[in-house]
Amino acid sequence: MTVIGTRLLAVGHHQPARVVPNSELETMVDTNDEWIQRRVGIAERRWAGPDETVVSMGVEAARMAVTKSRLNADDIDLVIVATCTAQDRSPNTASQISLALGISGHAAIDVNVACSGFPHAVALAQQAIAVGSATNALVIGTEKLTDFTDFTDRSTCVLTADGAGAFVLSAIDSTADEQSEVSPVLWGSIPEMGSAVRISPDEHDNKFTQDGKAVFRWTTFELPEIARTVVERAGIEPSELAAIVLHQANLRIITPLAAKIGAEQAVVATDVTESGNTSAASIPLALSKLLSTSPLPPGAPILLFAFGGGLSYAGQVVGAPLHQ
């Protein structure tokens, strides 16, 4: 029996042109560059202008990924968008991006799992490919968090940023010599911690708020063991990982993980330092930028893992893209 596996063909990203250094935030709230970098590791971030939207940024990231994949719009038969900052309830973001790209006659789905949305979306695409419901999937993470930022709250306004990233995933016939390059997802949630990260119309005028200490404690104690389990499900050892791309929330969470799981040889994406927290966009954005400067051998194993609102988490191992 032929098993349908999944390969990552290409990645892409897009960021707004406006760079906002910590020094600019010093003029807005009671903060300073030393405090921000010490607490979260962010030196600068990108903020979208009034004419830049979740859709327009997603279109640009997706266009880059599709172009690099060497596929045409007509080849894409599934579009999944991960976002928690959609500008419309309907039509959804996936259908609007599809229209702009000339992709038609396919399934178009939005997924809102906040910061962990992208690996959830990758998992849904991989599962659709595995059962033959799709052949080539476009998966996009796109966020305009500044639309939901309280610029009077120094604990959160220093974090948020805007941007988009995208994957093109494609079916492959897995044989004894060629296995799926996207591993089964490990995902879950802790609903009792749901209020730790939220955007609620009933609180703070629909602005992003979080209990940063609670999330940091959870990642400190729980993340390493979950990450090891993700790698185990992929059938490899942590020492075989070529790269680690976590949700870009806090440098103090990102940098220790490799050593904690025994993957010191892995390249660790630290895009949070120059891009800030872009929620569901952060993983594909960080990976695309990493590969643009440090390409990896196609198929080299990369750990993806994200956590955030819900409190939800998800992760899988993917092979480095065929086309970089």
Image (spheres, helix red, strand yellow):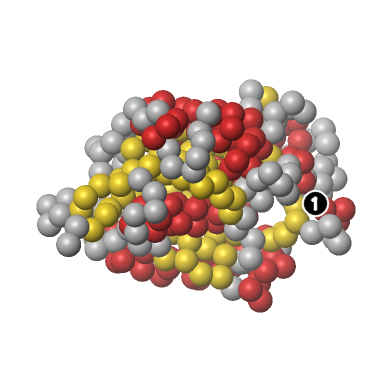
Q: Horizontal and vertical percent for residue 284?
A: 48, 42
- Kindly indicate the quadrant of the structure image that contains residue 98: top right
Q: Horizontal and vertical percent for residue 157?
A: 75, 44
Given residues 112 and 202, the one toward you in this image is 112
Query: Which residue was labeled with disc 1?
Result: 207
- Kindly indicate the quadrant of the structure image that contains residue 124: bottom left
Q: Horizontal and vertical percent for residue 207?
A: 80, 51
- Asked whether, in this view, residue 194 is left or right of residue 264, the answer is right
Q: In which quarter of the image is the C terminus?
A: top left
Q: Quadrant of the N terminus?
A: bottom left
Q: Is residue 262 visible?
A: no
Outermost residue toward the bottom in this view: 192
Q: Is mark 1 on a helix, strand or loop?
A: loop
- Asked whether, in this view, residue 289 is left or right of residue 90, the answer is left
Given residues 236 and 52, the one toward you in this image is 52
Q: What residue type is labelled 1?
A: Lys
What residue is shown at x 68% (from left), y 44% (from top)? 91
- Kindly indicate the quadrant of the structure image that contains residue 37: top right
What residue is shown at x 47% (from left), y 66% (from top)? 187
Given residues 80 and 117, the one toward you in this image is 80
What residue is shown at x 55% (from left), y 56% (from top)? 116
What residue is shown at x 63% (from left), y 65% (from top)? 310
Outermost residue toward the left in this view: 177
Q: In this view, does 153 lie above or below 187?
A: above
Q: In this view, does 3 lie above or below 222?
A: above
Q: How many marks?
A: 1
Structural crowding at the residue carrying mark 1, measured as other residues with C-alpha within 10 Å and reported as few (<14), some (14–19) or many (≥20): some
Q: Horizontal and vertical percent for residue 26?
A: 78, 35
- Asked whether, in this view, residue 111 is left or right of residue 209, the answer is left
Q: Is residue 9 visible?
A: yes
Given residues 142 and 227, the one toward you in this image is 142
Outermost residue toward the top in this view: 17
